[in-house]
Image: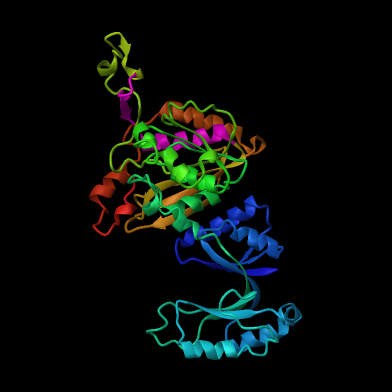
Amino acid sequence: MQYLIRFTQWHETFRLAEIQSLATYLNIELKIIFYSDELPSEEDARALMKRSILAQSIHEHWATANTWDELHVAIRRDTAQWWPRYKQSSFKINFDTYQGSRSSSKRKELIDSLAYLPFDGQILMSSPEQEFTIFEEWEWDSVPKNIPNPLKVHFGRLISHSVRDLINIFDLKKRTYISTTSMDSELALVTANIALAGPGKIFYDPFVGTGSFPIACAQFGAIGFGSDIDGRSVRGEGGKKSLKGNFQQYGLEKQIGDIFVCDLTNSPVRRARILDGIVCDPPYGVREGLRVLGCKDVEKFANLVEKGKRTYKSPDFVPPKKPYSFTAMLEDILNFASDTLVDNGRLSFWMPTANDEELEIPVPTHPCLQTVVVCTQTFNKWSRRLITYRRLLDSQVDMSAVALKKERETVNGHTADDLNAFRRAYFTGFKTESLAREAIPN
């Protein structure tokens, strides 16, 4: 059966990635045909909408045509066998135009042209048993150009709306505890979907901050773990104004695995294949240089005992940090994922890049990980990408490539400035006043 999905107008490169990931998670055979989806059953269509954030609704596809006359021919020719099912149902017909508009009188005229459909039920504008929708696709900027006809016309029966209202429920403006780097609710939920979060799964964010990603994963049933180099961001002010308080705000406290303080290179997480997913928005080294735990000035922190007490055990102790390479961070994330993800487990992380090809940061690769999809959110002169990988089965891994990678990392090493050309360009080359505050990377 073919279905029409009405997507939101936001985040275009994320739409199919989310739907295809949900089909993978739900084990649904999905075939994409020009943004309409062929699914085995109506039950599968409803299942997709129970998780989708970027879709608005899904509709049983009845007909598509280039003109209204052709649409009427297609409806009469291809859908007559379905008419008896809805003959006595209450119903209404909606009108949805994309990139165009119709006057109220013209909409009524076009809806009335469907009067040959033998529906005898009551017409109800509120809560009818069945809803049918006319979709018109118009050429961009069609109204001022006085273009008289749409490019395409579709007709379908509503199956289900999506759970897009979750965006408002998890809106950062309503959240008790956030920071300047908290990921907005829409993209956090989409990231959780693309990473295949779900009941019985363990998800981890090694740059957890105030917990946007584990909260999104928890909403879909996963157990959320997280860590951060900054213990202050994890603890917050205590109580409701803390990371755990955010979970409590949404009634998700039972979905917390554990939250702890560490960095990716000094982590207590066992290097075993136990994680179903890793989701994160790593620091880009823009607001300040990247850091990891460690001593840049060894002599300054040589004596960690003061007046007979070990100062690192003091509640006020701030552990020393040293510069960290952007390149090293990317490789550490991929290596960590390779060591800890289960077969087909997913890593989804955000990464900046310049829109200038000369400054563009390539998508990192790893012999144990296969790139699933790269989604791009474009700002002005830079973008950030959500890169998603799946952990290959050991039988699929090229072990000679793994050995070569380890040898290269041992020989070459990294410096703290590796790939921070993006940071320099951000401040000197392509930063503009038009960048929104929420668009500035962390």
State the image coordinates of residue 308 (x, y, percent, origin top left). 30, 8
**Left-right relation of 319 to 336:** left
Q: Quadrant of the N terminus?
A: bottom right
State the image coordinates of residue 424 (x, y, percent, origin top left). 27, 44
**Left-right relation of 440 to 221:** left
State the image coordinates of residue 339 (x, y, percent, origin top left). 55, 31
Q: Quadrant of the C terminus?
A: top left
Q: Residue at x 37, y 44 (%)?
A: 177
Q: Is residue 425 magenta?
A: no
Q: Residue at x 52, y 31 (%)?
A: 404
Q: Which residues are magenta?
A: 314-341
Towards the viewer: 248 or 95: 248
Q: Residue at x 59, y 33 (%)?
A: 274
**Left-right relation of 285 to 364:** left
Quadrant housing residue 69:
bottom right
Whether residue 371 is visible, yes or no, is: yes
Q: Residue furthest top?
A: 308
Quadrant housing residue 397:
top right
Q: Is residue 317 magenta?
A: yes
Whether residue 208 is visible, yes or no, is: no
Quadrant housing residue 75:
bottom right
Q: Is residue 417 above or below residue 184?
A: above
State the image coordinates of residue 183 (x, y, percent, origin top left). 40, 49
